[in-house]
């Protein structure tokens, strides 16, 4: 029995010793990492604790360099609404009258004489010729006026002035069609070709014509076919931006005919009313350049006929403008004249000379540098401004 007790005691001692050796080792073993946390260096584990930490996200905004350029927001120009063209020449009449005052006063001083002798009639002729009416036109006007004064026995200045105004108006042929053919037809826009020599104000006039059309309710697209002068395309684009019209342009030095063709095609695709094509300034004695202008017209006509070809003439060039007009007419069949800078010359009679010599109606006149200083030509209002004063 004693042996049994001793065996049990020894067994208990052995078990207790084994437990004492195993438990400390288990305590020294590292706890397994928590799922989703790191235990390696650089993962946020606290040294000596075996516990992983998660850094909260930073709320600080990144610092921008001090030398960044300022942010520039490009603003589109406000779209302007041009003033209606009805009666525009009447509103601009005072401006024309100021430049023609010497001419008007000179005529009226002669007409106020009690007796109009040969010397008086020669002075009237000289005044008209000086105003660039032209020798042939002047002779016809004066002869008709002399006959009316003789037959009617006119005596007062007002009566003679009225008769002169009637003769000048008749010389302008008020029955000529001065309307601009700008309405779309046959599923395509009307096409207006703007031509003229360097320095006549052609690109500016092209932009102003666009404003005239928009003021009268037409939608307009510009074609910048003056590819030899980058400033011309930029200038025309600016005119278009002001009134909300698109501008088709090509590379500098590119083919003008190609630009004109593309402009008309886009006009057809966008269903605009009128396409205005600005061409390069041509010197009438440069045969090659004139041939190129003819090419532009032929290429454009692959879409359909050109509805208007407007020749821009500088009123200050006087009779030289007639030679310019004649050559252009032979190349592109000019249908109307735009006479610019008429407020800056006392030679407004060039209007009569152009129409009498070439049979081409003056359709628009420029009377200043303002965007709306281009007016439809009205013969009676023009003559009243030419003579000055009221009828």
Image (cartoon, rainbow, N blue to C red):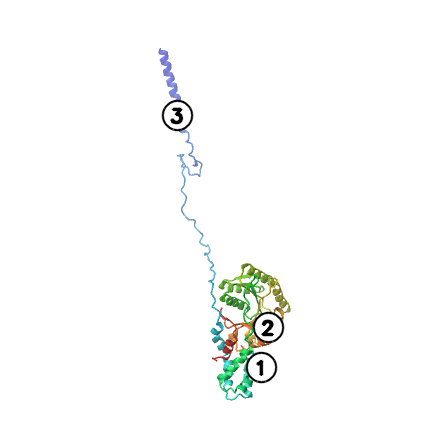
Instruction: Please tell me whether mark 1 or mark 2 is closer to you in this view.
Output: 1
Q: Quadrant of the N terminus?
A: top left
Instruction: Please tell me whether mark 1 or mark 3 is closer to you in this view.
Output: 1
Crowding around mark 3 (Cα neighbors within 10 Å: few <14, some 14 to 19, many 20+) is few
Gap in angstroms between the C-alphas marked 3 and 2 = 118 Å
The x and y percentages for residue 226 are 57, 65
Mark 1 or mark 2, earlier in chain: 1
Q: Residue at label 2? A: 325
Task: List the single residue furthest toward the top.
Answer: 1
Q: Is 73 left, or right, of 231 in this rendering?
A: left
The x and y percentages for residue 299 are 61, 63
Q: Is 53 left, or right, of 149 in this rendering?
A: left
* Corner quadrant of residue 297: bottom right
Relative height, residue 353 to residue 332 (above, below): below
Mark 1 or mark 3, earlier in chain: 3
Mark 3 or mark 2, earlier in chain: 3
The x and y percentages for residue 344 are 51, 75
Secondary element type, mark 3? helix
Q: Residue at label 1? A: 140
Q: Residue at label 3? A: 23
**Could you say which is closer to the camera, residue 148 or residue 352?**
148
The x and y percentages for residue 95 are 48, 75
Crowding around mark 1 (Cα neighbors within 10 Å: few <14, some 14 to 19, many 20+) is few
């Amino acid at each position: 029995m004693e042996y049994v007790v001793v065996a049990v005691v020894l067994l208990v001692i052995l078990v207790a010793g084994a437990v004492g050796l195993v438990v400390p080792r288990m305590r020294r073993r590292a706890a397994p990492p928590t799922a989703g946390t790191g235990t390696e260096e650089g993962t946020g584990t606290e040294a000596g604790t075996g516990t992983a930490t998660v850094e909260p996200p930073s709320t600080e905004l990144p610092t921008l360099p001090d030398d960044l350029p300022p942010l520039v927001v490009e603003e589109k120009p406000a779209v302007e609404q041009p003033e209606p063209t009805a009666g525009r020449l009447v509103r601009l009449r005072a401006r024309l009258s100021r430049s023609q005052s010497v001419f008007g006063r000179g005529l009226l001083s002669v007409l106020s004489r009690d007796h109009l002798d040969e010397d008086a009639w020669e002075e009237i002729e000289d005044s008209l010729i000086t105003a660039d009416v032209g020798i042939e036109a002047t002779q016809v006007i004066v002869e008709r006026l002399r006959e009316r004064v003789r037959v009617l026995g006119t005596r007062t200045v007002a009566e003679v002035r009225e008769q002169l105004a009637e003769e000048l108006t008749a010389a302008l042929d008020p029955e000529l069609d001065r309307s601009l053919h700008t309405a779309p037809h046959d599923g395509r826009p009307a096409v207006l070709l703007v031509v003229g020599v360097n320095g006549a104000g052609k690109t500016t006039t092209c932009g102003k014509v666009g404003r005239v059309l928009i003021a009268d309710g037409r939608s307009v697209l510009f074609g910048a076919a003056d590819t030899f002068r980058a400033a011309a395309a930029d200038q025309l684009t600016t005119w278009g931006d002001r009134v909300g019209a698109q501008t088709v342009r090509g590379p500098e030095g590119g083919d003008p005919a190609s630009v004109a063709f593309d402009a008309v095609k886009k006009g057809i695709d966008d269903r605009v009313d009128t396409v205005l094509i600005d061409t390069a300034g041509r010197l009438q004695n440069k045969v090659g350049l004139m041939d190129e202008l003819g090419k532009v017209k032929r290429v454009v006509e692959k879409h359909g006929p050109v509805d208007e070809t407007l020749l821009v003439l500088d009123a200050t060039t006087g009779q030289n403008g007639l030679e310019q007009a004649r050559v252009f007419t032979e190349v592109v069949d000019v249908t109307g004249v735009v006479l610019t800078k008429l407020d800056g010359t006392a030679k407004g009679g060039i209007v009569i000379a152009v129409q009498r010599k070439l049979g081409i109606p003056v359709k628009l006149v420029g009377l200043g540098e303002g965007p709306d200083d281009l007016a439809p030509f009205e013969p009676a209002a023009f003559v009243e401004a030419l003579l000055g004063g009221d009828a």
